[in-house]
Amino acid sequence: MSDLTSNGLRAAVLDDFEQTGIAWIWASDAEGVLSYLSPAAAEALDVPLPTLLGQPLAGLFETDPDDPDNRSGRPLGFQIKARSRITDVVVRCALPEAKTGRPVWLSLSGQPKIDATGKFHGYRGAAKDVSVEYQRKIEDQRLAEFDSLTGLYNRHRMNRRLESVLAAYKAAKRVCALMMLDLDRFKQVNDTMGHPAGDALLQQVAERLRNVIGDRGEIGRLGGDEFQVILPDMDDRGKLGELAEKIIQIISQPYPIDDKRAIIGTSVGVAIAPYDGLELDELTRASDLALYAAKNGGRGQFRFYSADLKDEEEERALLLDDLREALAADELQLHYQPVVRIADSHVVGMEALMRWEHEERGWVPPGTFIPVAEESSLIGPLGEWALHRACRDAMEWPDTVRVAVNVSARQFTGNGFVDVVASALDASGLAPDRLELELTESVFMGDSETTEATFTALKKLGVRLALDDFGTGYSSLSYLRSAPFDKLKVDKSFVDTCTQKDQNSAKIITAIIGLSKALGMETTVEGVEAFDQLDVVKKRGAELVQGWIYSKAMPQPVVLANITSGEFKIEPSGPDKHRADRRSMFRRIGIIHGDHRYEAVIRDLSKNGAFIEGLVGVPKGTQFVLDLGGGQLVVCEVMRSEGAQIGVEFESPLVSDGAGGLCTRHRVSPYALAAAGMPLTSLAQGGATPLGQQQAPSSPPQFMQVQVGSGG
């Protein structure tokens, strides 16, 4: 057979092959420009053949960046440039006109055409339509990496993503925050409303998280009611705390499901790389521990990870055992803080506050032991003891003075609570209208029918009901329509900032007082400590005040000693102006000045400053750097100096750590320490001694004034 006949036959065979649709033929020239493509391929792409021909292959076709088989992004261009063999590379046409309809995916294979002299003439190859198979692959991949219920990433995808982020950020010396969340009382929704309602709630939670996080991070559902958020390039604990609080607030809003309403909450744990962990397992464990601490702190809270969380579970178990023994041995106390009528300074009520003095721990804060009791069955007996003791003590007061007792949500919804209240009244002989039960909005998270029945039964007894911490929860106004409250209590957080012009707290106080009066309720404003605050709340219409400006909580013998002539009257006494909370403590810290480092002790700490002991002869106006431990450095200036005691003001305010304490927004990065010659480890691994466990200096050193430019 002649060459002409052979070539003709070959062309005919190729034509027939192209017509079958099994595959198409393509070719390029030495510059990588498409020189031939089967007409059927152009029809499949829905792009005119002349438009395709003459286009550079590397720009004409693109790979899918999310394809796990094409991790390098655009491998086709690299292979063409290297003149290497192309094998089953899945691409789609990159031209805009090819993206208007359903995407067509082609599998390209090709062989470089090189003659006997080694000259490259381009590629010759085949292509086939793999759209159906590739779409199925994408769907399988989606199912493998996405949660089918919420559409969020699943645990597998989040772990893989976090691992790759941490690896890349470690090399680039960048930071990354990790939030762990789980839903409080979600099981109750499933149990009372059914699993379909639980699924609907999870879908709404996912949507709310998307709205809050936006493009700041990636969200995943790990399973059940657990969620995770990756927040690249975030280490500002002030902003992270604000974001966590916003998440808690938004997630805690009621959920409409069919014709009912579900109410849940959430707790948040936060860990930050590289400070709290450099690897996936380290950072995940740190955020888990922080979440555990947030839940045990009373739920509806956030916590940052710190090294001392490692033993918290064991510590809480020991604390619970000690609390149980203290209750059995009658070692707990009730102290009473007066509620005073501003107009004439008469005491009209007393709030019972639980106190516990441990033989080894000293005074244990209620914020520490009450949440422990609420997580166990001990809250019932503890609440019953408080009700009986408070009613009995109130019988020794004037008839005009009421007693208020805090009631936890778990206690309120427990079986027999109304009987416990009735028993306390009967045993003491106290008139029911002299007992005021203080509730928070968390009581509405239970079964609404049971809650309403309990309210009705309590009102039949004749006791008074107060809604505590008003204005800080999720949907306060809706509760006032049905719950028979006699009083609203304005939360201390509004009073703390009511004198600041850049805050709306004073306006909120005015609104709450106005609302309360319109509904025929009393209002008590909590947390008034200074005369400037008292003046603000008085001008805003407040009539009843509770706070240190009148009195701190006091034990029953002191209460009785203050009652004379059948009436109880307290005149206000306190500072002219309110200052930020100062926390009394005994913490060993470092003071850095120039090339010297001194050891000292913090006695008081607030957001804006501290009171420090341990350094003699420090001039006013001296600038220091305080080392608070764990990579926390604070620039400050000495404002007062007397002997070995100095008062300093911080250059940048501290922020809440979520646990009632304070911390710096930023910390010294382990990357910076590594650059200075130290091993690269997380601060959690560094073994820094907890500040409260260090010893104070035996005698204060003399301050050495070192010349460091303008104040050092």
Image (cartoon, rainbow, N blue to C red):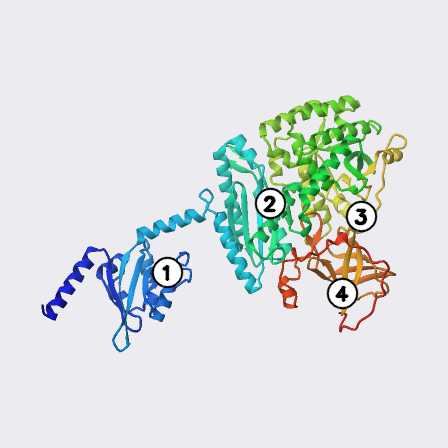
Q: Residue at x 63, y 60 (%)?
A: 681
* Callout 4 crowding tier (Cα within 10 Å): few <14, some 14–19, many ≥20: some
Q: How crowded is mark 1: few (under 14 residues within 10 Å), some or many (20 or more)?
A: many
Name the amino acid, label 4: Ile
Please indicate whether residue 291 sits to the left or right of residue 636 in the image.
left
Residue under label 1? 63
- Mark identifier at residue 592: 4
Circle 3 sits in a helix, a strand or a loop, which is it? helix
Q: Quadrant of the N terminus?
A: bottom left
Considering only order in the chain, which callout, 3 or 4, is on the residue closer to the N terminus? 3
- Compute the Cα span from label 2 to label 1: 41 Å
- Checking the image for residue 248, the label placed there is 2
Q: Which numbered disc, 2 or 4, marks the residue that appears first in the sequence?
A: 2
Front residue of this view, candidates 536 and 434: 434
Residue 501 visible in the snapshot? no
Q: Please tell me whether residue 324 is drawn above or below residue 153 in the rendered image.
A: above
In what element is the residue under mark 4? Answer: strand
Question: What is the quadrant of the C terminus in the image?
Answer: bottom right
The image position of residue 401, as x and y in percent, is 80, 31
* First in residue order: circle 3 vs circle 2: 2
Q: What residue type is labelled 1?
A: Thr
Name which residue type carries label 2.
Ile
To which residue does mark 3 refer? 531
- In the structure shown, which secondary structural element does the residue marked by tag 2 occupy? helix
- Determine whether 507 is above or below 194 in the image: below
